[in-house]
Amino acid sequence: MAIGKFGARDAGPVSRRTLLRAGAGLAGGALLPSGLILPALAEDQPALGTWPDGSSGSSVFVGISVPRTGTYAAAGEDLIKGYELAIEHLNAGSEIMTKISPNIKKGVLGKEVKYGIADSEAKPNTAVQNLTKFISDNKAIMVTGSVSSAEAVADNKTADREKVIYLVGISGSNDTTGKDCVRYSFRECFYGQTAAKAIMPVLIKNLGKNKKVAYLTPDYTYGHTVQKSMEEFGNEGGWTKATDQVSPLGTTDFSSYLLNVANSGADVVVNINFGRDAVLSIKQAKQFGILDKMTLVVPYNTPFLAKEVGADTMQGVFAATDYWWTLEDTNPIAKMFNDAFRAKYQYSPEWSANLAYAQIAMWADALERAKSFYPPDVIKAYEAGAKVQSTVGEVFFRGADHQLVRPVVIERGKKPADMKTPEDFYDIVEVVPGEGLMQSPTEFGCKLGSYT
Amino acid sequence: MLSLPNFAAQAFNGLVLGALLALIASGLTIIYGTLGVLNLAHGAMFMVGGYAGVVAYQYTGSYLVAVAAGSLFVMALGLLMERVVIRHFYDRPPEDQILVTFGLGIVYVELVRLTFGSLSQSMPPPSWAAGITSLGFMIYPTYRLAVVGIVAVALLALYLVLYRSRLGMIVRAGIEDAVMVDSLGIDVYRVFMIVFGIGAMAAGFAGIVNVPIAPITPDVGESILVETFVVVVIGGVGSFPGAVLGGLIAGEILSLTSMVDPAYSQVMLFLVMTFVLVVRPRGLLGEQGRA
Amino acid sequence: MIEARRGIRGLAFEGWTALALVVAPFVLPKIGFVPDTMNRVLVFGLFGVGFDLLFGFAGLLSFGQSAFFGTGGFVAAYLLTRMGLTSVMLGLAVGVVAAAVAGLLVGMIALRRTGIYFAMITVAIAEVFFFMENSPLSDYTGGENGLPGVPGPTFNFGFASVHVTGGWSMYVFLAVCYFVGLALARRIVASPVGRIFVAIRDNPLRAAAVGHDVHAYKLLAFVIAAAYAGFAGGLLGVLQGYMPPEAFTFDTSGQLIMQTVIGGLGTLIGPLVGAAVWLYLRDFLQGSLGMGASWKLALGVVFVLLVFFLRRGIVGGLSDLIALARSSARAPGKAAPGGGDDAPVFAAAPQNSNPAPPPARDPGEPEIAGPILQVRDLSKTYGGLAANSEINFSLERGELRGVIGPNGAGKSTFFKMLTCEINPSSGSIHFEGRDITNLGVTEVCQLGLSKSYQVNQLFTRLTPRENITIAALAERRGKFRLDLLRNPADIPGLSQQVHSTLALVSLTERADVPVSGLAYGEKRRLEIGLALATSPSLLLLDEPLAGMSPRERVETVKLLKSISKGRTTVIIDHDMDALFEMSERVTVLQLGKILVEGTPDEIKANAAVREAYLGGVLE
């Protein structure tokens, strides 16, 4: 009885569609190119998600949900720095923004970008709660942020349900743009499979064939998939598995695993742990003398890893990453970004900050190309796959799974003596081009949903 | 992975792991045994000890100063916490004590996060314990070997305080019969405060000694706390020898299980605890009295 | 504490709650609540209803409720997403059952210990659940990614079918679920089982001694709380279309506890209020105040202050305030019993001016000839020390026996063995011809043997009427019964028994004053009343006159005489005049052995007894 009464008040997508604006036409509305910026015409579609409410004023709202407490807080805070700098640049229409997205003036489509930040505690549950709050309360036209794939997947589903665009933060799982992909979400960073495929040939080239590998694998789906990928791509160089040490998330003492590694007779240690687990396992591997005998490989680098474990430990370590600041030597956009970042925060950006910055810039670019805030228009602008010049070179979003096709940076830890500045931790060994690296969009079962 | 050298190595490593757990657990257990308070902020105090020590290290560069600073700071924090908060909870239900220490634990963690941020902090081992030592059947980080000695000394000191001093007599009498101690005209509150301080110091000491092994972040206390619970339950709540024995058993379980299936080493710990509870509910060395 | 009063105003609380749930969507959004937040408040409120039954009523603080929250949630989500189950309600129901079964298994282990031990064990077991979800079972649970795609329920009303998605339709669905859960919990609280939960929290030892199977009731509370947790977990998945793995983490349990304490323990709606405050402050501190990462610190401080100063949480504090306002509005001098809404649920007293003691129970079978109690060669040693040695003792049916002896003669040890509080080292005890030597105190009480304690063992947070009711319930219902939804007033003869017991121990006038407000003599009489209310056929009274004024003694002796009519009674006391006046026979213990036994006159004349007491006391 009560349900029937309240059913009419339902604010879900079904009833939103019935809230037609006066004069709006239904049929074909969604297909009209909304080429004109005149608001009256842009509203020729039924309301969808936070559209048009979220973009009817002089400013638009963006919701950022990242961990600020808990184990992943450090990466979360770095993401925030990237977001804040990007939004500041966007509203100022700064030069670097126009390099990435030539059409940008000030703000997006002439509207100032405002934002809110909420602590996700790296918990999917809290992340969903934050997003929902941003969407229903602040009428956010875009939400973003995550430091784990669990968060990203949960955010994906929420954004898709609410019909609001979501930009993935850090998420290394194949599934985020694979079987858990959605129409409303876009990912900038690469993922486990790509990392393995990018770094393995470089390793074989540098370390030789027929090596024995010990794996340190965190005990969750992501860890196991990356481990499998590494093993698979290693086979091509005759690399074999000596041992796979699986540790629970949040392990603080790796000694028993490391002893097993030390006794395994391996030549190479592949450490798939992320975040604090990576820091601890590497530091302790150093204490056990393992790094003196075996080469350490980190297929998916953690922000601030070198800073936390120290250059002495990181020397000779191979890692795959999204971004390292010395890309500025060859890429002028990276140089501009680094300079602006250093000016504001007094250190060189990690890949998390770069990711956040790039996501915002490319989102603004998609908006400018769509010339509309109507979500399906924006998504189609993304899906058009326009080439964008970013801090890591030329990149584009794939229409079929919303994954950014982007290069993977393979870096190697420098000897402390060779470091030119205290932050000069890595040599860039190779920048592996993204095309040909990433699996085909169908490989992990991506089925994007509907636009409306 | 099952080979004799590896078994020997893991068994030895279990001892090292267990030593630290034993120290932390004995702090928790003497506080509970004497005051009847389960301090859920104990993990947070472990963490605070680490941070206080690291700060001292950054100013002085001395390991010994860092260890002293970490221990003393947490002891002071313990004394203050007992005087300002815990004292008002002795006549309240035990659940209230659990709740208030749980809340204080969160406050400590977030205060540290606010002050130092979320990036991990670390400190190198002292120069006399740097590097690696070969034990014949294995090579092992020298500092970890040193930690066994350091913890053994700390446990011995605790033992002397608990079993060979006047304070210790009062404390142990208190564990057996709080009413009796009360009637002897001893200032029980002062004893309680000191015991709380000593128990906290054990956690703080372990916290800073552990930093060269594992850099600290504000959250480290939570997992340590849960492991400490397991140790205390296995050994017997309120029993100092029980905490030491429980710690060593836990260390061995964690280490030896990793040879068979590393993913199960944590869970094995909980299963053993459950088994102990079924077979001997009061814990291996627990007294019948307190529960 | 909530006391559901049946009758005209009996459902007022439910009415107000329903009204609040209906009004909330129109009011709360004005202060910044969004539907999603309100929905989460309802889920955590429901989770908390079960937890409050467990902690607030039965007094069991579990830090492992996340295990059941996650179990219910993942079982439901798995059925709905991977198994193709279409009925959401069925999925939720299976989740509840799974959580309850998990609760039963975990409870059987964790409840081996109490208090702090129990809390620690629950933490550890919950960790195992989290590990299982995350690792060995990740093929079923999605591991760290959880299970996305949990559908919302669809209801077919014949004329229209409503599919619940997000927003307000979800609110209505959850509000109905919450309301049903709350109403059910209120019935449980008001039922005999609920009363016994409270008694166990207050004094588990006495609850067992009056004949309740404390362990079984604790397990029941644990299973009920697990079922509620499982239901809430299932709803969480339905609410957000996604079942998150962190449902299993320690944080979830911690948040539940904090919310329940902030809202108010033992109020049932406290957790809902606590969740609302928690989630609102969380958004408010981060959003409006822009506190960033320090929001958690602020909430932690708020929590500590609440535990420190506002012991009964927000709801408890408010109801205390209302009670205060009401009682000061009333005519001074007439004490408000329990205050305001806290009027007792217990059987309203029928007027009966001629109290008779509750009859000794009928053994049910043809009376066994011979003594009602037969003790042979009973010994108890502690270490090497003999507290009792080789006691032979027998009681005739209907006898009133006095037991005396100097301090340290082993009288209390002897009594404790008779009531099976401690097991003898050797020897045997037969009661009504049955060997009870190694039974527990609860079983023995159920057989009709009960004791009043030397040191008061009352349910101190309850009133005398409630105290007596707890004891009488054990006799009426047996040691365990699952009458979760029964109104105690419907139990035949219960109110009569409570009333007459109260009248007998002269506490009718004071029946609704909290025990803490009673005078010492009144507490002593209540202590006797507790033993008496179980209608024992053999009543043991351990120093019933201790600490009484001469006038109180006279009255109590009169009382003891009247209750000993028609039942067998044994009294230990130091007041020999009183004992000699009442008893037919007297047994003298010395140094753990029986010194002599005989009529009062024989005892008075016995030289050995005079010697034992150094001639001082017997004049």
Image (cartoon, rainbow, N blue to C red):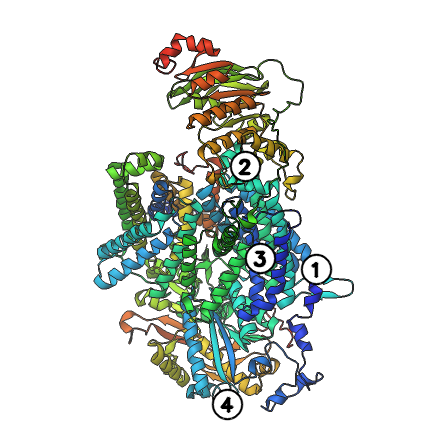
Give the spatial CA distance, label 1 vs label 2: 60 Å
Assign a secondary structure to mark 4.
Answer: loop
Q: Categorize mark 2 by other alpha carbons within 10 Å: few (<14), some (14-19), many (20+).
A: few
- Residue identified by numbered label 2: C509
Please state, as top left, top right, bottom left or bottom right, where the N terminus of chain A lies in the image. bottom right
- Residue A56 shows in the view: yes
Give the amino acid at mark 2.
Glu
User: Residue at the location (38% across, 11% down)?
Assistant: C610
Nearer to me, C370 or C543: C543
Element under disc 2: loop
Measured Cα–Cα span from mark 1 to mark 4 = 49 Å
Q: Which amino acid lies under the numbered mark 4 shown in the image of this protein?
A: Asn
Give the Cα separation between the discs numbered 2 and 3: 60 Å
Q: Position of residue C398 (x, y in %)?
A: 58, 17
Quick one: label 1, few (<14), some, or many (20+) residues within 10 Å?
some
Q: Position of residue C580 (x, y in %)?
A: 47, 15
Disc 4 is attached to a residue of which chain? A
Which residue lies under the disc numbered 4? A103
Residue at mark 3 to residue at mark 4: CA–CA distance: 45 Å
The answer to whether marks 1 and 4 mark residues whose Cβ atoms lie closer than 8 Å is no
Q: Between residues C4 and C92, which one lies in front from this camera angle?
A: C4
Quick one: label 2 or label 3, which is nearer the N terminus?
Answer: 3
Residue beneath disc 1: C86
Which x, y percent locates residue C21?
61, 61
Disc on res. C141 = 3
